[in-house]
Image: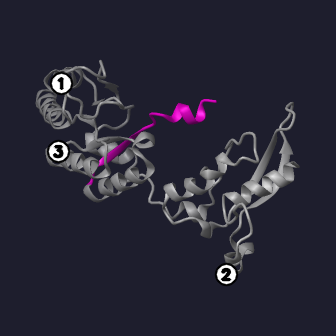
Amino acid sequence: VPPEECGAAVAAESSTGTWTTVWTDGLTSLDRYKGRCYDIEPVPGEDNQYIAYVAYPIDLFEEGSVTNMFTSIVGNVFGFKALRALRLEDLRIPPAYVKTFAGPPHGIQVERDKINKYGRGLLGCTIKPKLGLSAKNYGRAVYECLRGGLDFTKDDENVNSQPFMRWRDRFLFVAEAIYKAQSETGEVKGHYLNATAATAEEMLKRAQCAKELGVPIIMHDYLTGGFTANTSLSIYCRDHGLLLHIHRAMHAVIDRQ
């Protein structure tokens, strides 16, 4: 199959096309909505491998939806049988579409304001061992780190709500450790509480608990937790004055090779 035909098929399959001609094509303007493969280059030093450049009309994507964007661009087209293999090398998003996303609810300056640290780097650590500690001993480790001079501590990515340490117990013991360290050092301290859970509703419940405890920073494993859940959590944090730390667990599965 000529590379030009493959590029055109990828553009069509990921936008308005399907495997055959259908009568409903005449009910819309395919020229307006279809993706277009506008350039193809051979991969240097490789036989029968090509880089295809595909552009999509912005109206194909729901505003502010990472989920919808990726469903089109890296969706069913990657199972396209006409191709031996397909790989996404780069993705460029136009400013007009970027502006439909709210972005991070807070930046580094707000984090500095929250923990009252200026003019230097912030010093923190992740509690180890990441799994196996009871909630009480976990809180003890947090206290020792903060009392010893760290600005903040952090949950690891797979600390959620396991039998040896349920999330609510962890939140309570960590909050106690923070307040104790603050009273003894006279400094504002912090901890990144991992609010990642099996459902978006449960994550919002954990975020609310962190807010009620006065712990201003929560964390989310956004790749394993999902883009839609991350957007919901981000909106909650924006509305309730929480800082949201994003963990990239699973990224290497996608980008290492």
Disc 3 designates what residue? 214
245 is higher (above) or lower (below) than 91: above
Residue shown at 34% from the left, 45% from the top? 244
| Segment tinted magenta in the rendering | 241-257
Neighbour tally class for label 1: few under 14, some 14-19, many 20 plus, Cα within 10 Å: many
Three-letter code for the amino acid on which mark 1 is drawn: Tyr
Three-letter code for the amino acid on which mark 3 is drawn: Gly
Disc 2 designates what residue? 27
Distance between the Cα atoms at labels 3 and 1?
Answer: 16 Å
Q: Earlier in the sequence, mark 2 or mark 1?
A: 2
Left or right relative to 16: residue 174: left
Q: Earlier in the sequence, mark 3 or mark 1?
A: 1
Residue 41 in which image quadrant: top right
Report the quarter where the C terminus lies.
top right
Cβ–Cβ below 8 Å for labels 2 and 1? no
Element class at badge 1 = helix
Image location (x, y in percent) of residue 26 = 71, 80
Three-letter code for the amino acid on which mark 2 is drawn: Leu
Neighbour tally class for label 2: few under 14, some 14-19, many 20 plus, Cα within 10 Å: few
Cβ–Cβ below 8 Å for labels 3 and 1? no
Left or right relative to 24: residue 123: left
